[in-house]
C-alpha cells in the first residue's frame, strides 16, 4: 500500500492548493492523510473521512485537522466519541483490512496565547496523548492491523525541545506499536515531527520526502510530505523497537 502523509498548513494560497492537488494526482497513493487542510481537494475523491469540525479555534466551516482518503471504502469510522481527547484532531476507520488512525496532536503552544488562551505550554499535548493511549490499546487488541499516522508534534529521538515530553508519546503507543519513522530526517536534513506508527504485523518504509520548498523553490509548508510503503510483515519475529531516550 502506497501511503502519503502531509501537513499542508491550511494551504493558504491558490498556488499551494494547485501544487498539493497536482502532487496527489502524480503520486496517486492508496491511502493518504492530510493534516490542517480545507476541503479544496476532496471533491476528486470518493472515500474521504475527517475529524470533527470543532478543534477549539475559529473555523470558517471547511477546515479539518485530519483528512483520511482511501481508494477503498471506509468502515468502522471512529471520531473518539466518549474519550477525553481534545476535540477535532482524530479520525480512524478500516480500509483494505487495516485500521488507519489519523491524528493531529496539539502543538506545545496550543491554546496558550491563541485560541482559548486557557492552557499552559504542552498541557493540551499531554492531555491528548493520555486520552489517545486507551484508544490505541483497544485497537491493538483486535485482529485487525493498525497504522497510526499524522502530526505527532514530537521529534524522535527527542531534542531539548521535547525531551521532557517524549514519554507521554511512548506511553500512548505502548508496546504494541513501533514508530517506523523514528530517527529519520527529511530531504532538508531536518528531524520529522510527522510520523507513522504501526502494530507488529505492519511496517512502514519511508521512500522519500518532499521538501518544504518543493514547488520550484517556493514555500509550500513548514512540514515535508512523507511518501512510503505500508507492508505486512512476512515473519513472526518481533519488530525492532525505537529506543526510548
Image (cartoon, helix red, strand yellow):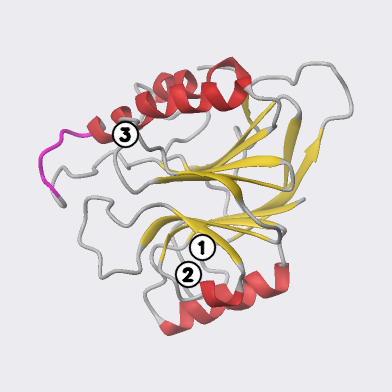
Magenta segment boundaries in residue numbering = 116-121
Identify the mark at residue 220; answer none if there is no mark. Answer: 2
Q: Position of residue 164 (x, y in %)?
A: 34, 21
Secondary structure type for disc 1:
loop
Q: Mark 3, residues whose alpha carbon is within 10 Å: few (<14), some, or many (≥20)?
A: many
Q: Locate residue 158 relative to residue 199 in the image: left or right.
A: left
Q: Position of residue 114 (x, y in %)?
A: 15, 52
Residue contact between numbered discs 1 and 2, judged by CB atoms under 8 Å: yes
Q: Earlier in the sequence, mark 1 or mark 2?
A: 1
Is residue 185 inside the magenta stretch? no
Q: Position of residue 118 (x, y in %)?
A: 10, 39
Q: Which residue is mark 3?
A: 125
Question: What is the spatial separation of the Cα atoms under label 3 and label 2, in whole angstroms?
Answer: 25 Å
Most distant residue in the right direction: 234
Q: Which residue is mark 1?
A: 212
Q: Nearer the viewer, mark 3 or mark 2?
A: 3
Q: Locate residue 39 relative to residue 214 in the image: left or right.
A: left
The residue shown at (75%, 21%) is: 239
Amino acid at each position: 500500500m502506497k501511503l502519503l502523509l502531509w501537513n499542508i498548513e491550511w494551504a493558504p494560497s491558490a498556488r499551494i492548493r494547485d501544487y498539493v492537488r497536482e502532487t496527489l494526482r502524480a503520486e496517486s497513493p492508496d491511502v493518504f492523510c492530510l493534516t490542517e487542510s480545507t476541503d479544496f481537494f476532496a471533491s476528486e475523491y470518493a472515500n474521504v473521512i475527517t475529524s470533527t469540525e470543532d478543534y477549539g479555534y475559529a473555523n470558517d466551516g471547511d477546515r479539518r485537522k485530519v483528512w483520511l482518503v482511501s481508494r477503498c471504502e471506509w468502515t468502522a469510522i471512529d471520531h473518539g466519541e466518549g474519550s477525553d481527547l481534545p476535540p477535532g484532531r482524530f479520525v480512524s476507520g478500516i480500509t483494505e483490512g487495516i485500521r488507519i488512525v489519523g491524528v493531529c496532536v496539539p502543538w506545545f503552544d496550543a491554546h496558550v496565547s491563541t485560541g482559548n488562551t486557557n492552557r499552559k505550554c504542552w498541557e493540551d499535548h499531554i492531555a491528548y496523548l493520555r486520552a489517545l493511549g486507551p484508544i490505541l490499546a483497544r485497537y491493538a487488541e483486535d485482529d485487525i492491523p493498525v497504522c497510526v499516522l499524522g502530526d505527532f508534534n514530537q521529534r524522535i529521538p527527542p531534542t531539548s525541545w521535547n525531551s521532557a515530553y517524549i514519554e507521554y508519546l511512548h506511553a500512548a503507543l505502548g508496546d504494541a506499536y513501533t514508530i517506523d519513522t523514528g530517527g529519520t530526517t527529511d530531504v532538508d536534513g531536518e528531524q520529522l515531527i510527522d510520523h507513522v506508527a504501526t502494530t507488529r504485523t505492519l511496517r512502514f518504509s519511508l521512500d522519500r520526502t518532499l521538501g518544504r520548498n518543493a514547488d520550484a523553490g517556493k514555500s509550500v509548508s513548514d512540514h515535508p510530505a512523507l511518501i512510503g510503503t505500508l507492508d505486512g510483515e512476512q515473519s513472526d519475529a518481533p519488530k525492532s523497537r525505537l529506543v526510548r531516550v
